[in-house]
Amino acid sequence: MKSKPVLTILHRLAILAYVVFALFPLFWLLKVSVTPNDLLYSEGVRMWPSRTSFDHYAFVIAHSAFPTFFKNSLIVAGSTAVTVTILASLAGYALSRFNFKAKYWIVALMLITQMFPLVMLVAPIFKMLSPLGLTNSLTGLVIVYTAFNVPFATFLMQSFFDGIPKDLEEAAMIDGATQFVAFRQIILPLTLPGIAATLGFVFTAAWSELLFALMLISGNDSSTFPVGLLTFVSKFSVDFGQMMAAGVLALIPACLFFLLIQRYLVQGLTAGAVKG
Amino acid sequence: MASIDIQSIRKSFGAFPVLHGVDLTIQDGEFIVLVGPSGCGKSTLLRMIAGLERISGGDLLIGGQRMNDVPPAQRGIAMVFQSYALYPHMTVRQNMEFALQIARMPKAEIDKAVENAARILQLTPYLDRLPKALSGGQRQRVAIGRAIVRDPKVFLFDEPLSNLDAALRVATRIEIAQLKEAMPDRTMIYVTHDQVEAMTLASRIVVLARKGIAQVGTPLELYERPVDEFVAQFIGSPAMNLLAGEIIATGAETVVRLDGGGTARSAVPTQTSDMGRKVNIGVRPEDLLAVSGDGLFSGEVQIVEALGEVTQLYVARPGGGAHIIAKLPGIHPDLRHKTVTFGADPAKVHLFADGRSLLYR
Ligand SMILES: Nc1ncnc2c1ncn2[C@@H]1O[C@H](COP(=O)(O)OP(=O)(O)O)[C@@H](O)[C@H]1O
Ligand SMILES: [Mg+2]
């Protein structure tokens, strides 16, 4: 079926409008980050400053605690993403393939954990982590983030495993593959899109989490970058230029990460497995 | 040795029984076709032989060895799935090599086996393609190729052709028949719901029904001497017509007065004690003949289906009820709304009492 040209054009325009709408704040971030301080308020609202400078970047990298925040965030988001994905893959596989008595209750329990507003949980979690020495520590953050992300990631992974026909594992069994070989050579390659999606989802969630990072951490040494951004807000002024420069820098790892996994995100890896 | 002994095998899913007590002995080199209504447990039985489904009770012997608890890979079987179950991220060659690599066969032998199978199945030009770049028929052949390279003693097929279109189905059916001929000592068990596949491929057909085996026999045995009304109506298409009546003469030939008014002669012998017994006679649509004078019944032809080589007539049943179907050779466009009398050769008239054939007792 050929679509009508008018419809195609409308369709493209709608997408364009959406992309502009979604990316405009990012553009503004970039714009402010390269605007010299003296032009920030003097030029009125302009799409691009008459003179650009990278001074804010230089300052943020050389003279602020930002590199520490950045490193902390990288550690926290990376560890959380990897831990959650491993746990969620195993749990998702079990939920997808095995029937066991407690399955219903485990699923219900996991859903219940998702029902509370996080603000409610901050105080009790602080109470729990404090005696364990896990406040003010990146490990504590990783544990909390992992706990909050595992349920959703498990459901995500389960749906990916559900998409892999059971026949494939049975065929592998008949071909003589052990459970482990079948998992590594058949299931894992087919689940890469799911793993990539889960990694990406958890990484960005942990990367930009503010509430717990703010409540559980005090002091610059173990702050993550969202908390660090707040240090650009002082009692008397907000240093927008530096804040935006830090924001742009913070986007880089997330972008790199998605560039890295995007080829696994393409669907259709299981095409051709079954039927004609 | 690839004989298969199925000894009172039972299967339940939880509390739900699917098969209760199946007994079957399959000789070396047989081509067994399993047929039966949907959901009667054909796939379940096949999967128990393959080792993909636990056996709830009874014994499974392959080549004289008890296999109940042996893992699938060590049973000497290969299975072709209805869904093909090709590994989608592997090329045709890798799909076929997989089992051999796991078995640590030397590379040279693997190549030889794969190339040989590819040649038999005309897959050589496609060896480096992914399954998604193949047509349905080619995928099916890869699935068969994956089974062949392992050189198993027993081939298991679960409705392998049901996803193909009609023309391809015929072509692949013939390929499977030739494959079997090329490997006379390999045993094949084949599940299908296609009458033609069952009749043409099988050395013996097993009809499954009501949680067990209804009848086992060569295709023609099942066609000519069905053990009960179920098998009689299941084998053959359209299904055998059943007409109720009462035995009025016994002996080497039996005479039945039909409730619809006619009289039927059957070559099935009966004893004097059978006099007056309520029976159903069974006549296949292709055995009904248009006759002048006395016959089994007369009725108005309500629907005519001209298929070219034959014409199927849907005839009003005397006394009401489902149509009686007759299949006459040739073309008969003029019979619609005519009242026709039908008869049949006594040798072709079956007798059933309480659902069981009077041939067997
Ligand atoms: N894994 C299972 N769990 C529960 N019931 C099942 C399962 N597999 C099959 N069944 C039931 O067993 C019966 C036989 O199924 P199956 O062997 O697939 O039938 P067929 O292949 O003859 O159509 C069906 O009623 C089906 O619902
Ligand atoms: Mg089936």
Image (cartoon, coloured by chain):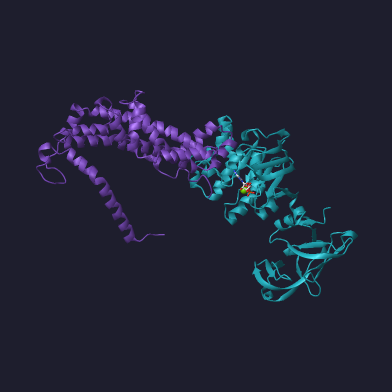
Q: Residue A74 at x, y = what percent?
A: 31, 30
Residue under the image location 33 percent in, 29 percent down:
A126
User: Horizontally, is A151 left or right of B158 in the view?
Assistant: left
Image vertical order of residue A221 relative to residue B210, above or below: above
Quarter that holds the N terminus of chain A: bottom left
| Depth order, front residue of A123/B264 | A123
The number of numbered badges drawn on the structure is 0
Image vertical order of residue B15 relative to residue A126, above or below: below
User: Horizontally, is A209 left or right of B79 in the view?
Assistant: left
Q: Residue B99 at x, y = what percent?
A: 57, 35
Q: Which chain is purple?
A: A
Q: Which chain is cyan?
A: B
Q: Residue A72 at x, y = what percent?
A: 29, 28
Q: Can see residue B129?
A: no
User: Horizontally, is B244 left or right of B167 in the view?
Assistant: right
Q: Can see residue A241?
A: yes
Q: Residue A39 at x, y = what percent?
A: 10, 40
| Depth order, front residue of A72/A15 | A72
User: Horizontally, is B173 left or right of A199 in the view?
Assistant: right
Image vertical order of residue B264 relative to residue A216, above or below: below
| Depth order, front residue of A105/B307 | A105
Q: Quadrant of residue B31?
A: top right
Residue under the image location 21 percent in, 29 percent down:
A61
